[in-house]
Amino acid sequence: MRTAILAFMIAMFCAAASAIAAEVDSRQSLQDAQQFIDELNANIPNGWHARLDVAGDGRGLEIAIESNETLPVKYFSPNPPPGGPPVQNTVVALWLHCMPYMKPDEFAPAKTRNDELIERRLSFVRKNLAGIKFGYMGADPASPSAFSPATDAERVRVEQYAFEWLNTEPAKLPTHSHRLLSFIYVRPPLRIMDASRDAEFHKITDRIDRMLTPYEAQD
């Protein structure tokens, strides 16, 4: 009985310690995020601002860097419309999607695991889907929806690939870190049609590049 009580007390102590550590980490992460935002706001051109945003659409916590007004901009994509992308008048924004902090030595094995899963998808496509019509422009491997089977046999192979796709879903990994912060950050492919504002945008991205450390560089 005493052993059981002692084990229970140890378990409760460990749980409480873990909760306290998580709360401390959360407070430190919030402080780091605010310092990151303050440093950005002190160094980016007038007409732009950085803020912390709690997104309500499932994206979670983000740091947004935005223009103060709408600007004429072209967004480029792998499948541009005929004649190129249209000019849009919109607020230009950069997003740093916050993630649970990942230590650099945790990233490499997680990335290796993701690479193995993606290779399984590529191998399945090479071995089983050669010759099946598909329409796709983007990074390999193509998703099952990109394929258009013409026969029942081809349909079965695409359905098998759909299950393989589900079973090889890579983990979502951060791309960059800053202190106790981890982010997914991808520079958006755009050009602001006002040359001076486009130069400001590149100044901002250069500043972000100096503040963040890519996980790939920490291997």
Image: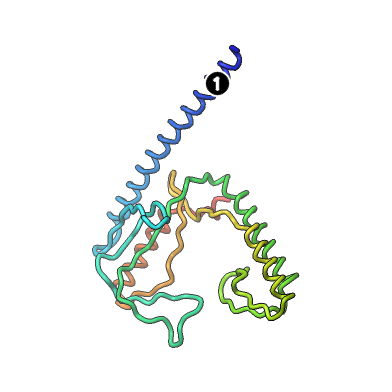
Residue found at x 35% / y 42%: 31
Q: Is residue 190 above or below residue 209?
A: below
Which residue in the rendered view is the most extreme toward the top? 2
Of 112 and 200, which appears nearest the observer? 112
Residue found at x 28% / y 59%: 49
Of 208 and 142, which appears nearest the observer? 142
Q: Is residue 46 above or below residue 196?
A: above
Left/right placement of residue 90 relative to residue 103 reads left
Of 192 and 54, which appears nearest the observer? 54
Residue found at x 60% / y 50%: 110
Circle 1 sits on which residue? 8
Query: Where residue 219 sits: x, y (%)?
Result: 58, 51
Q: Is residue 53 above or below residue 5?
A: below
Query: Where residue 173 sits: x, y (%)?
Result: 53, 53
Kind of residue sitting beneath label 1: Phe
Residue found at x 41% / y 81%: 85
The quadrant the N terminus occupies is top right
Picture quadrant where residue 11 is located = top right
